[in-house]
Image (tube, grey):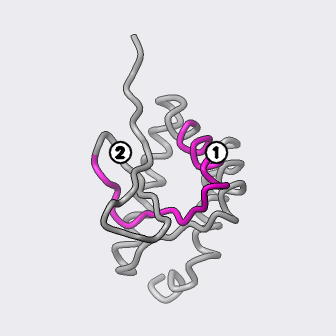
Amino acid sequence: MSKNKRYRLQTDAQNSMDLLYLEYNGERVPGIQFVYSPSDIHELEALIGLLNKTDAECSVLDNQIDFLHNMNTMLDRQITIQAKHLEKIYKLIKNKDWDGLTALYMDTHQDYEEIV
């Protein structure tokens, strides 16, 4: 029995910028967006494929996504993931380096320090 993909990327038809949003089970994950160019799409697809890989990884990743979303809510801002970070994010998730993923988020969102 094949499982439905849980994560996928979705464009926003009302936004003219090159932004993709993360969806989980058909619902948009608030506060997380990817800035991309057409040349990045394969990396993004590979990243989403990795997100959907196994239940065990997804349960940890769900917690990570929740963490990022909660941080984002506290900061009241979008998490914008630049294409230059895609390869790094992919490797961190592939290696299940959740601390590294959190550290990358902290490095790219210095405002976090203000609320700790």
The spot of residue 99 in percent (x, y) is 63, 57
In this figure, which residue is indicated by the disc labeled 1?
Answer: 42
Disc nearest the viewer among 2 and 1 = 1
Q: Nearer the viewer, residue 82 or 42?
A: 42
Among the 4 quarters of the image, the one containing residue 40:
bottom right
Label 2 packing within 10 angstroms: few (<14), some (14-19), many (20+): few
Above or below, comparing residue 100 to residue 95 in the picture: below
Q: Nearer the viewer, residue 116 or 44?
A: 44
Quadrant location of the N terminus in the rendered image? top left
Q: Nearer the viewer, residue 84 or 110?
A: 84
Residue in the image at 47% along x and 30% along y: 55
Chain-order first, disc 2 or disc 1: 2
Label 1 packing within 10 angstroms: few (<14), some (14-19), many (20+): few
Instruction: Report the span colored magenta.
Output: 27-49
Give residue 24's mark: 2
The spot of residue 97 in percent (x, y) is 66, 50
Residue in the image at 37% along x and 26% along y: 4
